[in-house]
Image: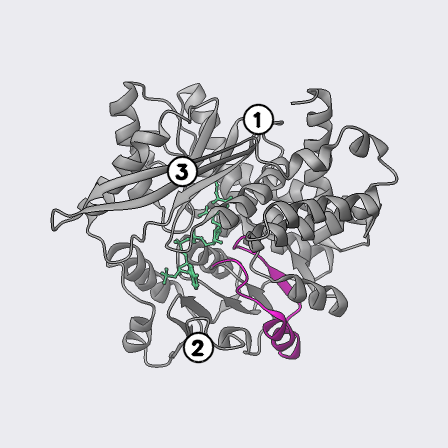
Amino acid sequence: MHDVTQSILDHVVKTDPHQPEFIQAVTSFLSSIDNLVDDLPQIVYHKVLDRLVEPERVIMFRVPWIDDDGQLQINRGYRIQMNSSIGPYKGGLRFHPSVNLSILKFLAFEQTFKNSLTGLAMGGGKGGSDFNPKGKSDNEVMRFCQSLMTELSRHIGEDTDIPAGDIGVGGREIGYMFGQYKRLTNRSVGVLTGKGPSYGGSYIRPEATGYGLVYLSAAILEAKGKSLDGKTCLVSGSGNVAQFTVEKLLHMGAKPVSLSDSTGVLLDPSGIDAKKLAYVKTLKNVRRGRIAEYAQQFPEATYIPHNGGSDSNPLWDVKADYAFPCATQNEINAKDAKNLIANGIKLVGEGANMPTTLEADAIFKEAGILHAPGKASNAGGVAVSGLEMAQNSQKLQWTPQQVDQQLQQIMKNIFASVSNAAEKYSTKDNYVDGANIAGFLKVSEAMIAQGYV
Ligand code: NDP
Ligand code: 2IT
């Protein structure tokens, strides 16, 4: 590593030694930026990297709420306002028991470059809580969301910071939080995205991350003279991103054969078709059930219990053409990466944020796998959030076709800027470097232009 990037990494490791996910995201970013340091001395002169790794603001707060037994429960709420150089802070809220500062800082850091890649004016932010929505009643979730928003409302605004969903936060949670924001402020503005279409939400926002992932992957394949048609695809997760990834893969003629959740893996060699996908949507979004039930409903499928305890994930040990991790960070380790390669995988398109460990990244690079990193390939979600903000400002609602067309164009533009940056500053087809570099260059220019803040 270059002395400059190494010293930034040393500083982060020394300052926050107990933040492994944040250190991982910074390490990956700095190794891509390494080649640029000598060519762009202004980055060093203006201490752009030193500033980027320090959030502009971190907010941590108590979230008290009453459960259905009348007991007081306490959770911790967070908002990381990472970087506002190209626009107001923008990024999702995650509700999951694993949520901590390290995870939210890695997500907010990556969000900064992802949002830059969309070409829209959005800075980077992320937030959430260690609240676990699993097993909670709708009323418990509502009381929790209202309490969280009571504090969060003083830190956000339609031109300041605009949260949205992420793991554990979908339409239901956004609705409850939006209702509470309005009640507290008496203002009906686009302060959250991912709202329902009946109260200011954008069409295609629920679909956008999964659809965008498949659009970007199709663009990569097209440039290589390949396509999705007839290809066997592995998909992990079974939430928002996984469901709409499967849906768009089906539109493109591909054959998705897997899903998962935090307790196990579902393999369906006969293919997950539109009827089975409709079953999954009801199972996960309405009944809030487990993916294991799929194998009872459709006996041609196999369910393998897996909770991350073993040294590899059986989902990544299946013969297929392309893989789409859509569950969570670090779900593909070195062993999984080797299994994927041994099974003939040619492309890894990341729906999740940072689903691959640093070791897995290196293995894919060595093997020449087409590897689209989350900050490029899952940017469709936040891109349509940006379009929702634009619609809210105009007090207009665009049609699903208009939004989908813009999403397709944005994903094409992302592919162009990522592959151009890879070719110019790194190695052709190194999309990991290309995404980091293309995202960074715009943020860096904006930071330098705005002085030392
Ligand atoms: P959902 O909550 O809708 O679904 C998450 C899925 O991943 C569920 O199937 C869940 O299983 C599984 N999962 C979550 N945590 C773990 C874990 N620790 N181990 C194993 N499985 C786990 O979230 P999304 O689909 O929205 O998010 C999935 C990924 O996509 C995340 O990395 C998120 O950051 C990223 N992303 C989301 C965007 C969006 O617009 N929603 C935009 C860009 C990226 P279970 O049901 O058991 O909890
Ligand atoms: O990781 C992400 O990009 C998201 N969870 C979506 C963020 C957003 O503001 O729509």
Q: Is mark 1 within 8 Å of ligand 2?
A: no
Q: Position of residue 182 (x, y in %)?
A: 28, 24
Residue wearing tag 1:
87
Measure the C-alpha gap from mark 3 to mark 2: 32 Å
Residue 419 seen anywhere in this rendered image of the structure: no
207 to 178, vertically: above or below: below
Residue wearing tag 2:
270
Color scheme of the displayed model: one colour
Report the disc number at residue 203: 3
Measure the C-alpha gap from mark 3 to mark 1: 23 Å
* Secondary element at image label 3: loop
* Secondary element at image label 2: loop
Read off the magenta span: 328-353
The residue positioned 35% from the left and 46% from the top of the image is 170
Q: Is mark 3 within 8 Å of ligand 2?
A: no
* Front residue of 381 and 426: 426
